[in-house]
Amino acid sequence: MIRAQQTKTAAATLISGVIVLAMAGTPAASAKPLVGAITPPTGPCPVTRTTTETVQHFSKRVIRCAAAKWVVPGGATKAICIASRESGLVPTARSATGQYLGLFQHSRVSWPSRYADWTAPAWHLRTHALNGRTNTIVTLRMVHGFGGWAPAGWKVRGC
């Protein structure tokens, strides 16, 4: 009985030693990022939300960034006003019927073609209309490209 226990203890010690040696061969200083680790955004307006920042404040920062890159009538002030009226500056906003999505309330049916027309694959933007950064970039590029809010499809009064 004692001999069997000694054999188990020796085996456990040997296995522990092998694990320690295997781990010692991987220097921590040169370790690569974990697979699936969060990577910072790329492309236009690669901003990230701070831990103390509201969704609305973050949405305004993204809109200001995009408005600085693609000049639109009324600038960031008008873009923020329109997004506020359309969605309350909440990127995941949906109309009651689900027909319109996101900060600027894009048509659910039109979104795939708008995304394809107004983004670049190299930007690695999320494809969903409920992503505030993507929705903002598509919107401001459309408004810039069409030369105004009304020609691009937004007729918001009071902004």
Image (cartoon, rainbow, N blue to C red):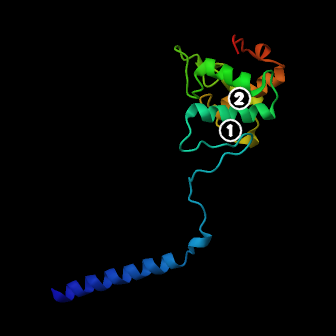
* Residue at x-position 41% and y-position 82%: 17
Residue annotated with mark 1: 125
* Relative to 122, residue 103 above or below: above
* Residue at x-position 60% and y-position 25%: 102
Q: Position of residue 47 (x, y in %)?
A: 67, 42
Q: Is residue 24 left or right of residue 132?
A: left
Density class for disc 1 (Cα within 10 Å; few <14, some 14-19, many ≥20) is many
* Residue at x-position 55% and y-position 28%: 92
Query: In what element is the residue under mark 1?
Result: loop
Query: In what element is the residue under mark 2?
Result: helix
Residue annotated with mark 2: 115
Q: Quadrant of residue 114?
A: top right
Tell me the kind of residue under disc 1. Leu
- Mark pair 1, 2: CA separation: 9 Å
Density class for disc 2 (Cα within 10 Å; few <14, some 14-19, many ≥20) is many
Q: Are marks 1 and 2 in contact (CB under 8 Å)?
A: yes
Tell me the kind of residue under disc 2. Tyr
Q: Quadrant of residue 30?
A: bottom right
Q: Position of residue 43 (x, y in %)?
A: 74, 42
Q: Is residue 139 left or right of residue 100?
A: right
* Relative to 2, residue 116 above or below: above
Closer-to-camera residue (54/101): 54
